[in-house]
Amino acid sequence: MAAKVPQQKITITEADAAAGVEEDNFHEMRNKVLSSLQLQHPIVFYQYNVCDMVKSSTLKKLKMDMLQRLCEELTLDVPEMSGKKKNTKLPYIKLLESAVSGCSCNTG
């Protein structure tokens, strides 16, 4: 039955070609923007190399306020802390470990 259907000749117009080029440019620009928004290796804040600190499990040595500043600087969703808990650093450390897991040092 498909053999009986006449084949249509496909023609590409200049407008189609221009639209294709525009779409390619859009995708290229989108990829550049997304790339610039992602964390780049190494993730460094002041003198702290967060990637190395996660790998060597030394984030726990940082003071609470520095962990908070690191998370805020990396625009991580810092949890609301209520009351005093024994391991108040743990949520911040987990956030930083999660952020580093997407870094090129772990994905590449």
Image: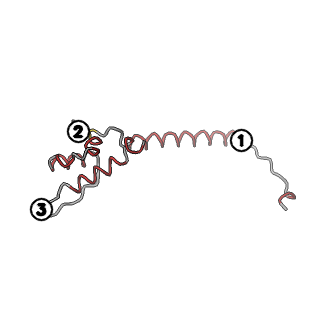
Task: Give the number of the disc on residue 84.
Answer: 3
Q: Position of residue 1 (x, y in %)?
A: 85, 62
Give the residue type that dot 1 points to.
Thr
> Cα distance, mark 3 to mark 2?
26 Å
Asked which secondary structure carries label 3, the reply is loop
State the residue lying farthest toward the top. Answer: 47
State which quadrant residue 79 falls in.
bottom left
Asked which secondary structure carries label 2, the reply is strand
Q: What quarter of the picture does the C terminus occupy?
A: top left
- Give the residue displayed 14% in from the left and 47% down from the top: 63
> Cα distance, mark 3 to mark 1?
68 Å
State the residue lying farthest toward the left. Answer: 84
Q: Which residue is mark 2?
A: 48
Q: Which residue is mark 1?
A: 13
Give the residue type that dot 3 points to.
Lys
Badge 1: how crowded within 10 Å, few (<14), some, or many (20+)? few
